[in-house]
Each structure stands twice: as structure tokens, then as C-alpha cells.
Image: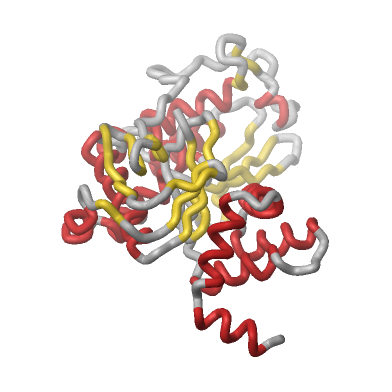
Amino acid sequence: MKQILLVGLVLFFTLSNCLAQDDAYNSINKREKTKNQKIKSGYVFIDGKYFEQPYKVKRKGLSVFINREKIFSIEKPHNPLKLKSKPEMPLETLNQNSSLNAISAIKNKEYNLSYIRLIRLFYLENYDFDSACDSIKAFYSTLPNVKSIEPHKKSNYTFEIHAYNGEIVIFSLKNGRTFNKKYGPARKNTFSRRNLIRSTEAMISYISEELLDNSLLFLFTDETSLKSYYKYPITQNGIYNVYNILESNYSDSIKIDNLNKTINNKYVSSEIFKSYNAKGQIYELLNNIITSDSTYNQIKNSNK
């Protein structure tokens, strides 16, 4: 399955962001406007190869295609653990004099993870987030070397672990919220097929609208599964900036650095630079876009 990184007028990254922004894209009118429509504007590059107009952006199952090229696939995240019962942590090596690091040193050979981490994951997988946080703190408080669990900055997911030997560790479960959303009790609704289809349709609508606005899209693929996206808009001036940077007399490294300041992605900046420097299709298209823009050429000529 392919991963697609869209840059130009759009960059795509995480499923949580996709679902969180779903309200911005759920207009039925917009979806109907672009559904099954052949788009004769915009420009699409996939792995440096230019795909000519017209473009048809469509969904097959949970995948999105531009013409016959798959550019996006979404699926319910697979949980490799699926902990149905709380692991029984052996406590023989712990006593009141034990350090707090000794807690993480107790390993589970089956999963090759510490018992304490597995227990945290168990609660995050089987309880809502707030209940999971409370249960994790309660478990820590039962350990032989833990004197008390204290709140930290009035946060439910960040707390202080006080040991009998005087150690104090501030522990945060903030990252556990993401795990809880993906694998916790609410995942059945969050990752229902209906919601996954809505996400793919939202992407179709967004890409179609960008192409209708004559956007320039660079797509780069690899062999992993893209499960969500993040959008990053670049204004029309951004295209001019890219062209000016590539045509400048700066060194190659400075050109790439300046491209990254415009595009905000080092990999994409490097790929665009290499393709342009080789006078490939990106070189031809960017020059055609710029030379056909009368306003840009007036500004360019006035600066000579």
C-alpha cells in the first residue's frame, strides 16, 4: 500500500487531524460539486512524474485515486497487543528502598516490554481516557517503593510519583490519549466504516477543490500505508517564491534551505530541487506557469 505526501498547495499527514478537521469538509454541496467530475485545471506530479489533465478524483473502497493512480488509503488501525486482562506484574524485586527506575526494569518476556508499560496500555485500551488515568495512578500507588501519588498542575494525565527513598518523578500520560483514541473503547465509533468513508470523501472534495483553483500538487510515495492527512496551504506567491529560489544564484544547500522555508518539508524541498536541477518535467511546468503569467513578468521586468 502506498503512502502519499502531498505538497504544493497541500500537505497530508495524521488520521486524528483528518477526523478532527472533518467538520471543515463535510459540506454535501461541495462533495456533489466535485463528484465524478473531470477537472481540467491544476497540475499533478506523482514521484516527479507529471500527470496531464483532465483529472478525475474518485474513491474505491477506502482508497482515493487520481485517474488510475492510488494516492491514499485509509484503514482501521491494527492493535498488535489486544490486552484483554491486566498483566500480573511480579513484585519480588521491589521494596521500599528500590528506585523508581526499578519499576520499568521488570520485563515481560512475551511482549518484550516492561510490565508497567503493558499495564498502562491495558488501561488505555479498555477504559475511557480519564478512567484509565485514574486506574494507572491507583496501580502505581500500590507498588512497594511508591510512597504516594500526587497531582501535578491540576492535570489528570500528569502526576508526581513519590518514592520512599526520596525520589520524585513527574509522569505524563498525554501521549496515551492518542493511543486511547486509536485503540480504546471509542475506536469502534471513531474508526467505523462510515467515518472512514467520510474521511476519504473529504479528501476527494479537498483535492478536487484545490485542482479547480489551479493548484500545483507534488505527490511523493513510499511503500507504507497512509492512514490520514494534514493540510498545509501555500499561497500563489509561494509558487513564485519556489521559482525565484530555484533560479537564484545561491548555492544548492541554501536553495534547499530556502525552499524548505516556503514548503516546510525538507524531503519535498530536496526532491523538487533535484527534479528542477535536472530540467525535468517540474522544470518545464514551473517555467510555463511563470512565463504565462503576465503580472509576474511585469514585476520581473520592472526589477531588471
Q: Nearer the viewer, residue 69 or 81?
A: 69
- What residue do we see at 27% from left, 34% from top? 60
At which x and y percent is residue 224? Answer: 51, 30
Q: Is residue 99 above or below residue 156?
A: above
At which x and y percent is residue 209? Answer: 32, 60
Q: Which residue sits furthest right?
A: 251
Q: Is the C terminus in the top left, top right, bottom left or bottom right quadrant? A: bottom right
Q: Which residue sits furthest top?
A: 110
Q: Is the N terminus in the top left, top right, bottom left or bottom right quadrant? A: top left
**In this view of the protein, can residue 265 be seen by the observer?**
yes
At which x and y percent is residue 70? Answer: 39, 36
Q: Is residue 205 above or below residue 124?
A: below
- What residue do we see at 41% from left, 25% from top? 78
**Figure disc tally:** 0
Q: Nearer the viewer, residue 63 or 108?
A: 63
The reply, left or right, for residue 76 in relation to residue 158 is left
Q: Is residue 79 above or below residue 253?
A: above
- Residue 62 quadrant: top left
Q: Nearer the viewer, residue 124 or 170?
A: 124
- What residue do we see at 66% from left, 70% from top? 244
At which x and y percent is residue 270? Answer: 68, 50
**In this view of the protein, can residue 156 be seen by the observer?**
no
The color scheme shown is: secondary structure
The reply, left or right, for residue 25 in relation to residue 156 is left
The reply, left or right, for residue 147 in relation to residue 123 is right
Q: Nearer the viewer, residue 16 or 253?
A: 253
- What residue do we see at 68% from left, 87% from top? 303
